[in-house]
Amino acid sequence: RAGGFKTAPSAGATYPLEIYMVVKEDGVEELEPGIYHYLPKTHEIELIKKGDYSRELMEAALGQEWVGAAPVNMVITASYERTTRRYGDRGIRYVHMEVGHVGENIYLQCMSLGLGCVVIGAFYDDQVKEILGVAEAPLYIIPIGFRKS
């Protein structure tokens, strides 16, 4: 959102979520395949890993074919300690509420652009972390692509 404001609420403005994009070969025009990290302060993405990881991500998601077929998979991860440091165990609930808000925003944006998406919650956490090269806990994989007519 313009001005650097967020479009989803975060308990105590702790912002525990990180967003990554796994871009498939020929998935996005003028964007090389790889894993990108979203930088909310500047509304930019940075390439953190080159290559097409869509097959590995599909395998980590229990072989769900739409993960492998999607041009782009958004992966939302959480650093729980950003929120639990302030709220204790209740912070876990707040993180889960926040990922729901962010996931809904992605759904709404996809719909407005004529794209299809689905939230995937069945995956091997450790494999997703290894693919992304991160320590945060993965919460959602959201394959995004053109809807079938």
Image (cartoon, rainbow, N blue to C red):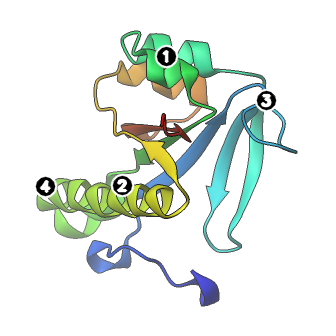
Residue visible at 60% across and 30% down in the picture: 133
Amino acid under disc 1: Met
Q: Residue 109 versus residue 45: which sits nearer the camera?
A: 109
Mark 1 vs mark 3: give the one in front: 3
Name the residue that disc number 1 marks: 58
Determine crowd level at label 2: few under 14, some 14-19, many 20+ residues with C-alpha closer than 10 A: many
Q: Which secondary structure, mark 1?
A: helix
- As measured in the structure, the alpha-carbon distance from the residue carrying label 3 to the one carrying label 4 is 42 Å
Mark 4 vs mark 1: give the one in front: 1
Name the residue that disc number 4 marks: 89
Q: Which secondary structure, mark 2?
A: helix
Mark 3 vs mark 4: give the one in front: 3
Q: Position of residue 3 (x, y in %)?
A: 62, 90
Earlier in the chain: of badge 2 and badge 3, it is: 3
Check contact, mark 4 vs mark 2: CB within 8 A.
no
Q: Image quarter for residue 81?
A: bottom left
Name the residue that disc number 2 marks: 103
Q: Position of residue 55 (x, y in %)?
A: 59, 13
Q: Position of residue 9 (x, y in %)?
A: 32, 76
Q: Is residue 54 left or right of residue 128?
A: right
Check contact, mark 3 vs mark 4: CB within 8 A.
no
Residue visible at 52% across and 49% down in the picture: 115
Task: Give the numbered dot on residue 140.
Answer: none
Mark 4 vs mark 2: give the one in front: 2
Earlier in the chain: of badge 4 and badge 1, it is: 1
- As measured in the structure, the alpha-carbon distance from the residue carrying label 4 to the one carrying label 2 is 22 Å
Earlier in the chain: of badge 4 and badge 2, it is: 4
Task: Give the numbered dot on residue 26.
Answer: 3
Earlier in the chain: of badge 3 and badge 4, it is: 3
Residue visible at 37% across and 24% down in the picture: 125
Determine crowd level at label 3: few under 14, some 14-19, many 20+ residues with C-alpha closer than 10 A: few
Amino acid under disc 3: Asp
